[in-house]
Amino acid sequence: RRSRLADRELFNLGITFTVYSDRDAIDRVLPFDVIPRILTVRDWDQIRRGVEQRVTAINLFLRDIYNTGHIFRDGIVPEELVKGNPQYRPEMEGFVPPKGVYAHIAGIDIVRNDAGGFMVLEDNARTPSGVSYVIENRHLMMRAFPDLAEGINIADVDDYGRQLAKALQAVAPAKIAQPNTVVLTPGVYNSAYFEHIFLAREMGVPLVEGRDLVVENDRVFMHTTAGLKPVHVIYRRIDDDFLDPKAFRKDSMLGVAGLFAAYRKGNVTLANAVGTGAADDKAIYAYMPRLIRYYLEQDPILNNVETHICREKEGLSYTLDNLDKLVTKPVGGS
């Protein structure tokens, strides 16, 4: 009964996501499991440290491939594997965003193995989504099962918006005392539009579309009823291709003309940075343990799911011999 009431509340609140491949059921209500997954303090400490380590390596990797290229010269990752990826953006070469942060928000997919240990299944560094569903799931659990939480010290998730706003303000262009942040959405038909609204509300910042912004003299402004208002940080939920018709796809109706030039001039910060997709390709995932050791001189706290690199003789041989038992994934930005 409580599960049915919870599903009804999710529907009434409009907490849905879109499945573009399903013609008969485009908007789906967020699945709600009435049996919570318990993470102990020790569990969470391992996850936190492992994710921080991994995202640090991802940011160092992105800075390296777009600037010095040490990892290519040292033979850790094949250069053609990275630069042949459609998500690699030559336009970012020679440019370092504020404080060297490329992936401000990352979605690290974690699973348990058969022994109960945590492993990373996938890295998402472009425009990761899903955190709003985590928070709404917690809120709904507390409303549907208040008796379940009695006498239990449960870690809070309600400060995510404040933490995100603080993190974005920290990477604003230099010498901006009170930076203005916005969330840039493709619009109401995007699969994660509910989350865009949610995050803007949680941070207390405007939710805008490309048509709400304008670039003048390499500076970004937002149209308001009181005139143009400067924008210093954009949490963008638009893919690189559609971000700026002057720099990328000329037929894009979602982005802002001149935005990338303003970004390169250091007048606005984009989160995540352009070109972060080069780090979350399925092929680069296989090299992540090596990246962590190369950049941080540490062993991974969270291991990958067992993965074989087919460009290497041993990996190819094993894969061909066991293909019927393995999961294969396309690479190159797919």
Image (tube, grey):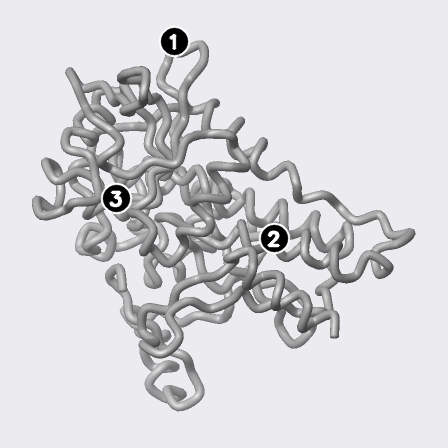
**Element class at badge 3:** helix
Q: First in sequence, mark 1 or 2: give its number.
A: 2
Crowding at label 1, few (<14), some or many (≥20) Cα neighbours within 10 Å? Answer: few
Crowding at label 2, few (<14), some or many (≥20) Cα neighbours within 10 Å? Answer: some
- Marks 2, 3: nearer the viewer: 2
Q: Is residue 74 visible?
A: no
Residue corresponding to mark 3: 73
Give the residue at the far right of this rendering: 151
Q: Is residue 297 left or right of residue 154?
A: left
User: Which residue is located at x 46 percent, y 23 percent?
Assistant: 169
Disc 2 marks a residue whose amino acid type is Glu
Q: CA distance from mark 2 to mark 3?
A: 46 Å
Disc 3 marks a residue whose amino acid type is Arg
- Marks 1, 2: nearer the viewer: 2
Pinpoint residue 41: horizontal percent, then vertical percent.
77, 50
**Along the viewing direction, whichever of 119 and 87 lies nearer the viewer:** 87
User: Which residue is located at x 33 percent, y 36 percent?
Assistant: 208
Crowding at label 3, few (<14), some or many (≥20) Cα neighbours within 10 Å? Answer: few
**Element class at badge 2:** helix
Q: Is residue 60 left or right of residue 133?
A: left
Q: First in sequence, mark 1 or 3: give its number.
A: 3
- Marks 1, 3: nearer the viewer: 1
**Along the viewing direction, whichever of 125 and 241 lies nearer the viewer:** 241
**Element class at badge 1:** loop
**Along the viewing direction, whichever of 48 and 129 lies nearer the viewer:** 129
Q: First in sequence, mark 2 or 3: give its number.
A: 3
**Along the viewing direction, whichever of 153 and 296 lies nearer the viewer:** 153
Q: CA distance from mark 1 to mark 3?
A: 36 Å
Residue corresponding to mark 2: 136
Q: Quadrant of the C terminus?
A: bottom left
Q: Quadrant of the N terminus?
A: bottom right
